[in-house]
Amino acid sequence: MTEPKRLGKYEIIEEIGRGGFAVVYRARDAELDRVVALKVLHPYWTADPGFAARFRQEARAAANLRHSSIVTIYEAGEAEGQLYIAMEYLPSRTLRGLLEAEGALSLERVLPILEQIAEALDYAHGRDVVHRDVKPGNVIVEETTRGVQATLMDFGLVKAMEGSAALTSQGTLLGSPEYMAPEQADPERAAGVGPAADRYALGIVAYQMLTGRVPFPGNTPATLNAHEHKPVPPPRSLRPDLAEPVEVVLVKMLAKAPADRFASARAFIGRLREGQRDAQLAPLYEQLQAAAAEGDWAEVLALGGRIRALAPAYRDVVQLMAQARERLRRSQRRQVPAWAWAVGGVVVLALLVGLGGLELGWWSAEEPMEELGMVPTEVPTERPTEIPTEAPTEEHIKEPTPEPTPVPTEKPVPSLGDTWTRPTDGVVMVYVPAGEFEMGSDDDDVDYALQLCNAYRGDCRREWFEDEQPVHTVVLDGFWIDRTEVTNAQYQQCVETEVCQAPTTCDWGEPTYGDASKSDHPVVCVDWHGAQAYCEWMGARLPTEAEWEYAARGPEGRVFPWGDAFDGTRLNYCDTNCERDWADETVDDGYAETAPVGSYPAGVSWCEALDMTGNVWEWVNDWYDGDYYDVSPDSNPLAGCRREHCVAERSPTQARF
């Protein structure tokens, strides 16, 4: 037919799709002045006197669906002898186009798309609406700053067409045979088509996304017969690297009998995620068993923490970790040098009080990449010994970019030692994988801290240190944290935006900000509120005390970031307390106050973070509460979040001062 220039109140802009039943245009609603997707059915559908009524009825039902993953229908009507639907215009490609361009996708990319389709289907099924034509061509996918957005369209159109005389006259096969459930493929079972048929089609979509093809290709009666009678080709025969638990879930969703499939689309996605988790856990558990057999108890704690972050009750991990802690406790008591407490040995006692240092980090393993467009960088084998004396340059860190860079199509899964560059201020971050550790100080630690305090300061009280008790197990999700403190040069970027204020003289010393020779030193004399202002500028937050301590001590609870033995060559001893003259020649780093960030790469922590002992003390997000250790949550504790009312939400980003 000749392409119309106008249909009723809609001005046709361009054709954007064509199929056996309709043509889709990008059009403008002249009355409301908005762009719509206008689906115009072929003229022969008006020859069926009952179709128009069914069409409006199904369009009305679909228009009443209100879900973020279901396209919004504005109107269904008839103009110039043609039936049409006006719906939300989404300027993106279909899932079919994505698969044609990229082929099989990773499970990490597949799950967010499937989950949104599943939620849309369960929502519609709860309102007695069955789609009947779930396929990649009916799913719009859009890349956003928050990740991929999937939107399902064409609800109810197939049902309206069922039984139409126009199908017989055109010799057209209704629906999409490659995605049809067995009960939908058999005309004699049409009355039994319900939500389970949509779930079967969702299983076919998942199969195709993970293997690169549908189980029964073709759009012929033979394809329908295969759905009814032939077993599904094992997904791993097409993709050998697919985890076996994932294959089991896919095959169950494609069972011939509707009752043998998952009872909801959400349950299907949940089991896929469990399959993904099981695939991740199996190799970790093998490594844990090997570490236990070799008596590497620190490694047992590290691996066990990663496993329990994914599955708290997995096999005998809890028992193996308890055994590891007991063996480590029996080992010889680790000696801590007397000066460690005096100059801010926060690693030993987790006394995370601030002295003006600023260091930023990120909580989520995925969101920084999506929201801020981070670009992965090579993990250096050695940190450069030359420290920049001017503003950060490409030699040391990536220059900050004014706009986020595009999100990579295939996001890397971060692991221990991975780095990212934050584009806003050019700070390099390191990834801290999920895990658990023993947070706090036991009685021996408290007694020893009191001994050190009395020896070097005098008139100390035991209760000063008892708020770090009791020792308790804390489980943390993976997060990103800065490799070093934020420098004067980096902080200056915030000052230049007038969001942050230039540091001035403070109770704990003189600022080095503004001294060109110390542009690569950590910024000091920034109070907690100033740190928060910087965080807001960054869209970040300060790390919690638990996150900071875990990044410094690791899952085995090291005394120092590098291990349990003191080595004065691994840290800059002098900080803003140097007027105490506690340093001696063996540990004096030659700086009267702060030192350039990263000056001591040998002091690197287990997660590749630097400067976590010495230089400056750092702010954390938590505020002081003397009994917090008694009531704090065991999983991802937040500032002020107590067990009985832990309702605070986690920010996707965090910052460390």
Image (cartoon, rainbow, N blue to C red):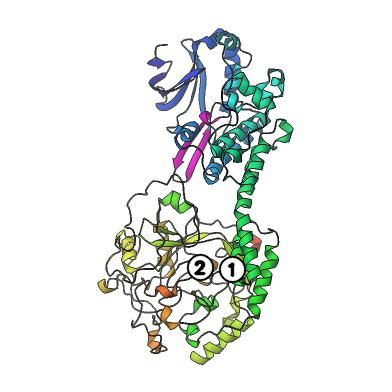
Kindly identify the amino acid type of the residue bearing the numbered disc 1.
Answer: Glu
Residue 270 appearing in the image? no
Left or right for 360, reference 649: left
Point 36% across, 55% down: residue: 423
Residue 415 percent location from the top left of the image: 50, 58
Identify whether 368 is placed above or below 359.
above
Image quarter of the N terminus:
top left
Q: Is residue 136 magenta?
A: yes
Which amino acid lies under the numbered mark 2 shown in the image of this protein? Ala
| Left or right of 407 on screen, residue 555 | right
From the image, tell me which residue sits under label 2: 551
Is 396 displayed left or right of 244 in the figure?
left
Q: Are marks 2 and 1 in contact (CB under 8 Å)?
A: no
Instruction: Mark 1: give few (<14), some (14-19) or many (20+) Cα within 10 Å.
Output: many
- Residue 195 x %, y %: 67, 30
- Where is residue 211 shown, x and y percent of the image? 55, 38
Secondary-structure class at tag 1: helix
Residue found at x 45% / y 25%: 37
- Badge 2, how many Cα within 10 Å: few under 14, some, many 20+? many
**Foreground label between 2 and 1:** 1
Residue that carries the numbered disc 1 in the rendered image? 299
